[in-house]
Amino acid sequence: MSRNHIVQIVANTLMLTVLILTAPLLQAQEGVEWITFEPGEGPGNGKHIVLVSGDEEYRSEEAMPLLAKILSEHHGFRTTVLFAIDPETGEINPDLQTNIPGLEQLGSADLAILFLRFRELPDEQMRHIDRYIQAGKPIVALRTSTHAFNYTRNPDSPYAKYSWGSDYPGWEGGFGRRILGETWVDHHGVHMGEGTRALVNGLFERIDHPVIRGVRDIWAPTDVYGTYPLEGENDILLWGQSTNGMTADAPVNWSKSVMPVAWTREYPASNSRTGRAFVTTMGSATDFESEDLRRLMVNAVYWGLGMGGLVDSESNVDIVGEYDPAMFGFGDFVEGKTPSDYR
């Protein structure tokens, strides 16, 4: 037996040992720090989707488990939901910006869904996000993910370039601008006073773009964000019009222009690779009461995975189980919850 063969056997043995030793640990943490939904029948065929929640305002800790259940039960994907966890209590605390355990799950993810706001994660957690992005894997991003990161505690971190206000060369505007096509700008609509009526871009409807297939009527209680995605870099699928009020029957505010509220793009990864990204500035937990918003998100997952041809305009996007989302707002998250409470 050659020396190379012996080295390979030793390496394989060590790898197997690591897997055996770490598997029980990972299994033990499932349900404590994150939750996983096993796939039902469907075109997803067990592909792994990791949903990462962590925002202080829009109840991503409620919206992401709902979306995970829909994707698993109705579409056959295996889904894992991660949360901002207080390490002292083990409870979900979206106000805590520095801890999202389980991000190593991104290593086996076929697609990531991000709903983050102003996170400053430790380097050992952030490196999993960075590796995922550098690999050019598909991303679906919601609402505050345009300003997902904000490095103020550790500005010397190698990941400080992800910060929403970054001026790092090539990363101006941080993760939002470089990867998603836009960073935080402002509220175009009146926050907590106006909602969003989505208008389908007829040009993409005519060519049957899979992300908006079957999407006709979205109204969301969150207001329209100001956005300026660069022309030529993003395909705008939905425009958002402000409504004079936060009910579905509120009239449109004709004094305000429309803004992009959903788009797709190819983002720059590493080694000349690119990745697919779908972005929407809608997406609070209350927004997900809209059937067509749920359809938009499911369609975006199929598109991101290169499965756009399988998008069915009448596929099942029904809510799984009970869903009574909390209203968005700072300091209003439901306290005392652990990941297993959202199964």
Image (cartoon, rainbow, N blue to C red):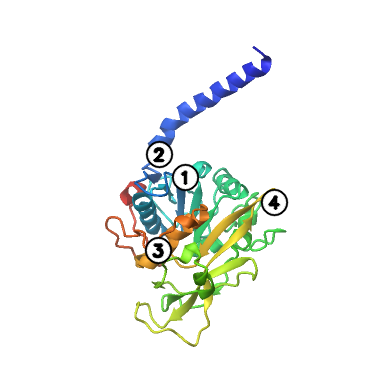
Disc 1 or 2, which lies upstream in sequence?
2
- Residue 43: give its label: none
Instruction: Determine whether 286 is above or below 224 in the image.
Output: above
Instruction: Determine whether 6 is above or below 74 in the image.
Output: above
Disc 1 or 3, which lies upstream in sequence?
1
> Circles 1 and 2: CB distance less than 8 Å?
yes
The residue at the point 57 percent across, 59 percent down is 150
Residue with the most extreme top position: 1
Residue with the most extreme left position: 322
Disc 2 or 4, which lies upstream in sequence?
2
- Residue 272: give its label: 4
Q: Circle 1 is placed at which residue position?
A: 101
Q: Give the residue type that dot 3 points to.
A: Ser
- Label 2, label 3: how many angstroms apart (C-alpha)? 37 Å
- Disc 1 versus disc 4: nearer the observer: 4
Q: Quadrant of residue 181?
A: bottom right
Q: Circle 3 is placed at which residue position?
A: 313
Q: Circle 2 is placed at which residue position?
A: 29
Q: Give the residue type that dot 4 points to.
A: Ser
